[in-house]
Image: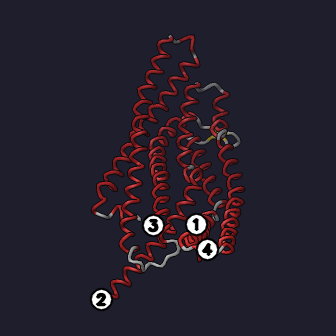
């Protein structure tokens, strides 16, 4: 999977050059996001005291936002387009690395054609989605944690706890870490079930293809039995996702009010402005969301684990087949 793209001379420009372009693009986007977060403080401070400011100052702030937002939109659009190209090139590298051995006809892996076509496609699509998200989350965390640290200097008291230096930073870290551990423990069975789903679907698909290509081989009772296995494993997945989603959404909705609770002692004293509240809430949200990456992306990560496991099995069989051919030649 990785060697065929990142260590193959044919794809070095795409893998490393393209990856560097995406990282630089995300770095610029995160930098603009930091500037927009700073803009919110001035804008809300302006709204808090409208009688003390001229209407021209309002329009100046709107224009300032446009100057920040337009480059972000253009860059985000280009990045999304290039990411799709990048992921497809990765799929192409994997496919043409597998094909020479697979076409030898000696690879005995159930659903090998599906792994070559569908699993490589799914792997590329998931990497396209998760890859940018994880890099963006890391960069956002690096950019906003110092900002939140600085803004938290004036927030030194937490409800029910008392004085804590840079309180909001610790609240963000501990709440996100606790949520990640909670969701990981609740959803620990999901990767295995997702893998079993792919196995059942592959067996069912294989029987349908045999029945289509060789009518005399079509066995309705066998197809019905295989579909029963597909239905059973899907229902099992739905049940496990039922309680997983209940815990996930309860946690995420509960976290919405956490920064406001943390700020409550400072807000009621009138020591901070509306603009400052908005700036620190947004900085807190950026840090917290970055730390909650695993929580928010867990279903997609579960699918990636399953696809990766299937492709690794396929690669091992290909490697075994290659070694057998080399032994015969010797």
In the drawing, does residue 186 fall left or right of residue 103? right
Q: CA distance from mark 1 to mark 4?
A: 22 Å
Front in this rendered view, residue 272 or 250 = 250
- In the picture of the structure, the residue carrying the numbered disc 4 is 218
- In the picture of the structure, the residue carrying the numbered disc 2 is 330
Q: Earlier in the sequence, mark 1 or mark 3?
A: 3
Q: Quadrant of the C terminus?
A: bottom left
- In the picture of the structure, the residue carrying the numbered disc 1 is 198
Q: Is residue 195 visible?
A: no
219 w.r.t. 79: above or below? below
Front in this rendered view, residue 267 or 244 = 244
| Quadrant position of residue 99 | bottom left
Front in this rendered view, residue 310 or 71 = 310
* Residue 304, horizontal then vertical, whole percent: 52, 60
Q: Earlier in the sequence, mark 1 or mark 4?
A: 1
Q: Is residue 54 visible?
A: yes
Q: Is label 2 in contact with label 4 (beta carbons under 8 Å)?
A: no
* Residue 184, horizontal then vertical, whole percent: 62, 59
Q: CA distance from mark 1 to mark 2?
A: 38 Å
- In the picture of the structure, the residue carrying the numbered disc 3 is 116
Q: CA distance from mark 3 to mark 4?
A: 25 Å
250 w.r.t. 123: above or below? above
């Amino acid at each position: 999977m990785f060697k065929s793209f990142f260590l193959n001379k044919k794809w070095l420009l795409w893998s490393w050059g393209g990856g560097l372009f995406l990282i630089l693009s995300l770095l610029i986007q995160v930098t603009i996001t930091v500037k927009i977060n700073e803009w919110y403080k001035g804008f809300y401070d302006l709204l808090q005291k409208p009688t003390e400011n001229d209407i021209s100052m309002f329009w100046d702030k709107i224009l300032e936002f446009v100057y920040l937002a337009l480059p972000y939109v253009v860059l985000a659009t280009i990045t999304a387009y290039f990411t799709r190209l990048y992921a497809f090139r990765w799929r192409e590298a994997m496919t043409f690395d597998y094909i020479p051995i697979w076409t030898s006809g000696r690879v005995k892996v159930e659903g090998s054609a599906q792994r070559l076509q569908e699993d490589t496609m799914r792997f590329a699509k998931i990497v396209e989605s998760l890859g940018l998200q994880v890099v963006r989350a890391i960069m956002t965390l690096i950019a906003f944690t110092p900002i939140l640290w600085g803004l938290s200097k004036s927030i030194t008291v937490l409800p029910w706890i008392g004085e804590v230096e840079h309180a909001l930073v610790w609240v963000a870290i501990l709440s996100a870490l606790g949520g990640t551990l909670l969701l990981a423990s609740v959803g620990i069975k999901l990767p295995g079930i997702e893998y079993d789903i792919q196995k059942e679907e592959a067996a069912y698909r294989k029987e349908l293809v045999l029945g289509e290509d060789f009518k005399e081989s079509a066995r309705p009772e066998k197809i019905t039995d295989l579909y029963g296995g597909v239905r059973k494993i899907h229902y099992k997945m739905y049940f496990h996702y039922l309680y997983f989603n209940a815990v996930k959404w309860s946690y995420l909705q509960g976290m919405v009010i956490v920064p406001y609770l943390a700020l409550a002692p400072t807000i009621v004293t009138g020591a901070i402005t509306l603009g400052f509240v908005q700036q620190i809430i947004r900085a807190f949200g950026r840090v917290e969301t970055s730390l909650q990456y695993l929580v928010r992306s867990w279903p997609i990560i579960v699918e990636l684990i399953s696809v990766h496991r299937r492709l690794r099995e396929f690669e091992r069989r290909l490697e075994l087949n290659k070694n057998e051919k080399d032994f015969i030649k010797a």
